[in-house]
Amino acid sequence: MDELSKVAFDVRKRSKKLLSLLGEDLHEKEDVLSLALLSAIAGESIFMLGPPGVGKSMIARRLKYAFKGGDSFEYLMNRFSTPDEIFGPISISKLSKEDKYERLTDNYLPGSSVVFLDEIWKAGPSIQNALLTVLNEKVFRNGEQEIEVKVHALLSASNELPAKGEGLEAIWDRFLVRVYVDRIIDEQKFFDMITSSKLTNPVVREELKFDETEVDGWSPLIDSIKVPLEVLSVISIVRKYIERFNQSTGTEVEKNIYVSDRRWHKIVRLIRTSAFMNGRERVDLSDCFLIANCIWHSPDQIDMVRQWVTRAVQKYGWSAKYSMETVRSQLETFTSDVEDQTKEEKELYMEAPTVVDGEYHIIEGFSSMNNRILADDFAMMGRGSSEVNLYTNTGRSESFTIGKFSDTEIEVRLGHDYHKYKLKSSKEHRIGKVSKSITEDVRIQLNKEADLLLKYLDKISHEIEEVRHSREEGVGKNIFLSENWRSLIDESLNDLWKLVLNYKLQTEKLKRSYGG
């Protein structure tokens, strides 16, 4: 194992244990907690939208136990909030003795490791400006000096989105991860919550917690995580969905989804962090589902962007990973080669039912006056029997039970017995293909094509089974995804496996057709 593998493997074990301990009794908020931890390690902030009393502040309080020396700062904003209440009061001694305007930041936002700002959009302009600098540059200007803000996690919440035209767009854009926090849906979990005793603080051993130095040390390792082609393919497709959606809104530009280049760069770093904390050296398609939490602008867009990401992963992600379009093209080429090498064109005389009055076939020797069948009805018949109308030459019809015996023959039920009749037919001259014998050299060449294709399809099958096995063992499951997302991954794996199996069956059938 290289350094990246060793560190990432250890981080995954600790992260899983931490999330298990911190998530006890959170009741359907475990996914939000995991996203908050991921955001913190990635150096990003998270915004939680939802009604009051659904556990948003509890998530922030729990998260502080993930960090050594975890001091938390929590504040409920209102329109009368002052910078003193957020960033600390002015030091009277500094002001009186040294004539310096500095704040006492300990136990306030600049001196805390986990910060929770509730009802953030109610903050005034002076707080907004200072907060924007903290979010942008991770620094706070305290008097004449700039101090580095060592906030591990900055969480914000509100029951509403920022109002338009109040200059809040810049702060809104800085919250990379956005999540809707709802009330408890599962009834049993709801009963567990309302009947539980007062929640106690989680007990987390110090060796499980993350400290500032090691988190800083992970940054170059996270930046070295590989981003493969299939992940870039998913991002490309999602961007196209966004572009198409924005075009559909017409003049209602306020409904548009805007994702800046800077934001995409941060999104990629977030999914790199997910890969790292899941113990991997490269981003995989499961990490891509996190994109859905980073691109919506209003609650009515949440389900839509989830569908975009899901379709991009299922239709294009796996296809790019295993070059399925190339496989399909190779199978088409092999099919064409088999056709060219094993068949030849010849002039054929084929018997076909004649058409009278532009739409009927005549049933020869049929005793009833209803001796006509519509050509379209005959063409659509399967090999089983069905109720079909037969017509007279004046257009009157009667229903009969009829079976298609061959391309020129039918069986008609009369009483309890079936009677076979021939349709009036004629010989038609056509150019058709008939089988021809092939040389051993041609057989060997076709076998090479087939075996290369089958070998690659077997390789894909083997890898799918490995992924399935690792997911069953829990090793391959992304610790930052909900069960709903995980079930979509399993579903897309099954779809890929079915496609691979279908291609294998087609290849093997073609191989048997020429005795390969």
Image (cartoon, rainbow, N blue to C red):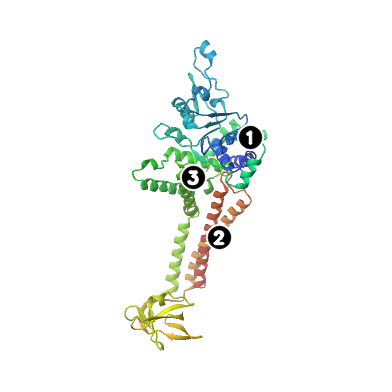
Q: Are marks 2 and 1 in contact (CB under 8 Å)?
A: no
Left of 204 or right of it: where is 101? left
401 or 398: which is nearer to us?
A: 398
Q: Considering the numbered disc 3 on the image, is that residue within a helix, a strand or a loop? A: helix
Determine the secondary structure under disc 1.
loop
**Which label was assigned to residue 292?**
3
Q: Mark 1 = which residue?
A: 209
Residue in view at x 62 percent, y 33 percent: 65
State whether residue 429 is above or below residue 73: below
**Mark 3–mark 2 distance (CA, rounded to whole Å):** 33 Å
The amino acid beneath tag 3 is Ala
**Label ID, residue 458:** 2
Q: Amino acid at mark 2?
A: Asp
Towards the viewer: 278 or 203: 203
Q: Which residue does the image show at 55% across and 57% down from the upper left?
A: 494
Labels 1, 3: front one: 3
Q: Earlier in the sequence, mark 3 or mark 2?
A: 3
CA gap between label 1 and label 3 equals 28 Å
User: Tag 3: Cα neighbours inside 10 Å, few (<14), some, or many (≥20)?
Assistant: many
Horizontal and vertical percent for residue 433? 41, 75
Q: 10 Å neighbourhood of mark 1: few (<14), some, or many (≥20)?
A: some
In the picture, the quarter occupied by the N terminus is top right
Q: Nearer the viewer, mark 2 or mark 1?
A: 1
Give how far apart the Cα atoms at labels 2 and 1 are.
43 Å
Q: Please tell me which of labels 1 and 3 falls first in the chain.
A: 1
Task: Indicate whether 96 appears above or below 170.
Answer: above
